[in-house]
Image (spheres, coloured by chain):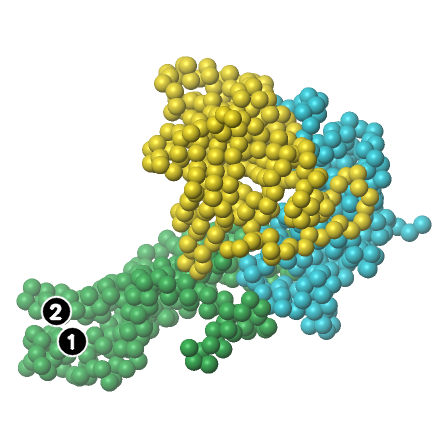
Chain colours: A cyan, B yellow, C green
């Protein structure tokens, strides 16, 4: 049995006195599409920051593709795991063209034939060469997100970490991006770790998922069971019910914190 | 048939910017009674501006024009600034997405709600405080006295929105316009906040305009739905009949939504037909 | 519109630029158009361009040499021969004014070359690095900020001898701290942005991030601050000249001219007033230009 693509064990992250991640453990097999679901404050984004190398102050074990995150600096991880951010309006430098964004990634790692690679990766995300020299403000939200995905892909990682990649996008654009991610995963055999609060997106794109609440992993399950709304945990059931839309009956079950 | 609570005909909102002209709302017309009306659209559809035009909050250089804009028989276009201000707040309230931007950061939450009360009612400080505490309890805040003294930055998202609801409903308006009131909230908190709005609107016999990009949510929460695209209304129907929508945009949007219970696989992509933008 | 003008317009406004150079030119063109739409900014630009033209064509525009003395003809009001009269040594005031533009522009240029890079680099590095690097650099900044310009100028002229170049050095060394503070403040806002995090995840080194990502975003506010400071630089140089610490006679520096004309202010007021007016006009020009530049360069203002 091959080593998992992502392995997290007893991960603990604290910011001052508050606990962001509390003894979280899960693993993602190579080529799998895994969802990490939770509301705000659940710790899901923190887990992603640990796995991408942005956050270095944590306890426990975390590995990507067999590399211990404690040892590697972000630059060493860059060709293994890449991160796509939530807000397409914030994740691209306002003064850099698409060409500069992609070219810089290639230059940092001294990739050969950079021009060719830039054209190839733009085509792979569904953008033609006419987008290559545009600035972010000349792109729509969906186009910017495609550029962000292209930036992640040009380094040919095996793992793609996605932080709410479609939350800031319109419904119609979201569908395009989800389809794109699905296709790219099939073509390149990528492992996807998708962090989101949207259970419908998870049901559409993921094979397995973990539900987080207040830093802990509450439940891990197959997406198939999610689609049947079968869950062992009350919290997960609440999330599923709330995701379906508004139902006055559900409101009685959920208690306000204050 | 009794007079509609709100009647809008041929509403236009235009912006004359230095580089180009933007025609954001193009001939929107609808009427509503004391019901929950949802306005759904993607970004750029003009839904937020429609709400703002009704309440008179379209900032310069925006220009609002309509052949009919009546609230409970009062012609909103004929009111001057002072008249408009007196009407809105007392009879029409508006809640927006992020309470952080709508609440005054240097006043406590309780003071702000009390102020909202006193602007529209002759009342002393004690009376205003009493009503404020009652209102905070009505939005299911468990410790109204404690929350009275909190500042906006000390209050979490869900509570902040409940505070906004309290502030907007304390003058007992007839119409509430809610622009993405729960989009910034967690989905469980969302259900609770919507339940509060639902209960209060029903109890007081108010009308509600619920503006959102979330088609699913609007369909399950509202009585009737208007779908906007490119500044126009492309579909009007009862919320329960949304799956039988006629317009290709609505159908496309419904098809493009991922669903929890659907099998995984490609979602049909919405093909925008320029004909939907209509004649200019 | 002629053919070449039409093709240029097409080149600069097409939504699909085809090369790095075209994209950069398009951005510059957009900034220029925003600037051009601002009337006061254009006034500022015109003033600056006129002064640069005067400096460039000084030998052609001056009627006399700025150095020729004529003690028989001192303190004369304006006449056909001396358009703005003569000063206390009989030199033509108008010609000294014209040549004085060269000195003024030289001071501005050299001070900017000293202060801007130092301020930008120190501020951006301090803001991005944080921790002890930030603390150390900011304390150094505080030390330089504490120096009064005139005292430092005095010290330098005592050590190195008087002259306009030492005055420039003194102004430069005391002029970079506010720019460093500004660059640091901008950097603190920028560094928590997603695009910076994205650059880190892609593997960019801190140096690449500071020079390639952070500094370009500090530029607009820095440029504006520098242009607004230029007015102040002229005044400080004039002040130093006034004290005899800057330009030395017979150099036609406006501040020194005001100093010399101080004694005659009641009867031959033009000797001091004319260079004073010139300083006002130049300061005004830079102020208006700097304001307009800020509006034009703001990336958020792009549609």
Front residue of B200 and C184: B200
Local packing at callout 2 (Cα closer than 10 Å; few below 14, some 14-19, many 20+) is many
Front residue of A16 and B239: B239
Left or right of residue C73, residue B245 in this image: right
- Disc 1 designates what residue? C93
Q: Is residue B172 above or below residue B84?
A: above
Q: Secondary structure at mark 1?
A: helix
- Disc 2 designates what residue? C270
Q: Is residue A231 above or below residue C9?
A: above
Q: Is residue B69 above or below residue A100?
A: above
Question: Which is nearer the N-term, disc 1 or disc 2?
Answer: 1
Taking the spot 67% from the left edge, 49% from the top edge, the residue there is: B248
The image quadrant that residue C51 belongs to is bottom left
Do dots 1 and 2 share one subunit?
yes
Front residue of B162 and A48: B162
Front residue of C19 and A113: C19
Q: Quadrant of the C terminus of chain A?
A: top right
């Amino acid at each position: 049995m091959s080593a998992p693509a992502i392995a997290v064990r007893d991960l603990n992250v604290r910011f001052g006195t508050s606990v962001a991640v509390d003894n979280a453990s899960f693993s993602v097999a190579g080529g799998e599409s895994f969802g990490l679901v939770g509301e705000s404050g659940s710790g899901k984004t923190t887990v992603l920051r640990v796995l991408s190398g942005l956050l270095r102050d944590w306890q426990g074990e975390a590995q990507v593709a067999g590399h211990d995150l404690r040892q590697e600096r972000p630059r060493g991880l860059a060709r293994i795991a890449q991160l796509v951010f939530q807000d397409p309006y914030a994740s691209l430098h306002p003064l850099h063209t698409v060409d500069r964004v992609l070219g810089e990634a290639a230059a940092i790692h001294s990739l050969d034939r950079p021009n060719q690679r830039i054209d190839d990766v733009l085509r792979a995300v569904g953008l033609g060469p006419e987008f290559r020299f545009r600035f972010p403000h000349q792109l729509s939200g969906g186009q910017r997100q495609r550029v962000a995905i292209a930036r992640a892909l040009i380094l040919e990682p095996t793992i793609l970490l996605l932080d709410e990649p479609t939350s800031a996008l319109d419904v119609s654009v979201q569908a395009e991006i989800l389809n794109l991610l699905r296709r790219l995963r099939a073509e390149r055999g990528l492992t996807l770790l998708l962090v989101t609060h949207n259970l419908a997106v998870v049901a559409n794109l993921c094979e397995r998922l973990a539900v987080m609440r207040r830093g802990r992993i509450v439940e891990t399950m197959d997406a198939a069971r999610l689609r049947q709304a079968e869950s062992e945990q009350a919290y997960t059931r609440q999330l599923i019910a709330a995701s379906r839309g508004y139902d006055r009956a559900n409101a009685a079950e959920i208690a306000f914190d204050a | 048939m009794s007079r509609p609570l709100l009647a809008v005909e041929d509403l236009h909102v235009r912006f004359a910017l230095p580089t180009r002209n933007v025609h954001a709302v193009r001939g929107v017309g609808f009427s509503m009674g004391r019901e929950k009306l949802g306005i759904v659209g993607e970004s750029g559809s003009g839904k937020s501006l429609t709400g703002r035009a009704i309440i008179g909050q379209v900032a310069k250089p925006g220009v609002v024009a309509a052949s009919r804009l009546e609230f409970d028989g009062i012609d909103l276009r004929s009111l001057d600034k002072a008249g408009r201000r007196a009407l809105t707040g007392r009879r029409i309230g508006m809640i927006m997405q992020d309470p952080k931007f709508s609440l005054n950061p240097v006043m406590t939450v309780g003071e702000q709600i009390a102020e909202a009360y006193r602007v529209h009612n002759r009342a002393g400080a004690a009376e205003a405080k009493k009503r404020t505490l009652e209102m905070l309890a009505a939005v299911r805040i468990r410790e109204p006295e404690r929350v009275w003294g909190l500042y906006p930055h000390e209050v979490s998202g869900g509570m902040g929105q409940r505070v906004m609801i309290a502030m907007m409903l304390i003058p007992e308006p007839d119409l509430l316009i809610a622009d993405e009131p729960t989009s910034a909230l967690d989905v469980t908190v969302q259900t609770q906040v919507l339940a509060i709005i639902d209960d209060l609107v029903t109890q007081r016999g108010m009308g509600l305009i619920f503006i959102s990009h979330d088609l699913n949510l609007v369909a399950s929460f509202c009585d009737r739905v208007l779908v906007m695209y490119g500044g126009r209304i492309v579909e009007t129907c009862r919320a329960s009949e949304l799956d039988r929508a006629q317009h290709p945009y609505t159908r496309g949007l419904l098809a493009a939504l991922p669903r929890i219970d659907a099998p995984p696989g490609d979602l049909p992509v919405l093909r925008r037909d320029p004909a939907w933008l209509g004649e200019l | 519109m002629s053919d070449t003008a039409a093709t240029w317009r097409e080149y600069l406004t097409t939504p699909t630029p085809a090369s790095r150079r075209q994209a950069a030119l398009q951005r510059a063109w957009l900034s220029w158009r925003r600037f051009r739409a601002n009337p006061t900014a254009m006034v500022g630009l015109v003033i600056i361009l006129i002064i640069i033209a005067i400096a460039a064509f000084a030998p052609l525009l001056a009627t006399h040499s700025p150095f020729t003395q004529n003690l028989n003809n001192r303190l004369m009001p304006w006449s056909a021969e001396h358009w703005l009269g003569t000063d206390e040594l009989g030199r033509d005031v108008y010609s000294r004014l014209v040549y004085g533009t060269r000195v003024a522009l030289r001071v501005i240029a050299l001070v900017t070359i000293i202060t801007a890079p130092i301020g930008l680099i120190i501020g951006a590095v301090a803001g991005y690095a944080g921790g002890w690097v930030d603390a150390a650099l900011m304390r150094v900044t505080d030390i330089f900020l504490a120096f009064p310009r005139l005292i430092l100028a005095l010290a330098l002229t005592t050590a190195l001898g008087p002259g306009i170049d030492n005055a420039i050095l003194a102004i430069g060394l005391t002029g970079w701290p506010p720019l460093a503070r500004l660059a640091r403040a901008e950097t603190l806002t920028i560094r928590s942005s997603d695009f910076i995090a994205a650059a880190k995840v892609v593997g960019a080194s801190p140096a690449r991030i500071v020079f390639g990502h952070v500094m370009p975003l500090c530029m607009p506010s820095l440029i504006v601050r520098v242009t607004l400071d230029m007015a102040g630089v002229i005044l400080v140089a004039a002040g130093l000249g006034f004290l005899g610490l800057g330009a030395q006679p017979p150099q036609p520096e406006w501040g020194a001219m005001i100093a010399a004309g101080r004694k005659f202010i009641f009867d031959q007021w033009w000797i001091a007033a004319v260079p004073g007016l010139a300083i006002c006009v130049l300061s005004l020009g830079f102020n208006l230009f700097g304001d307009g530049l800020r509006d034009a360069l703001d990336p958020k203002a792009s549609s």
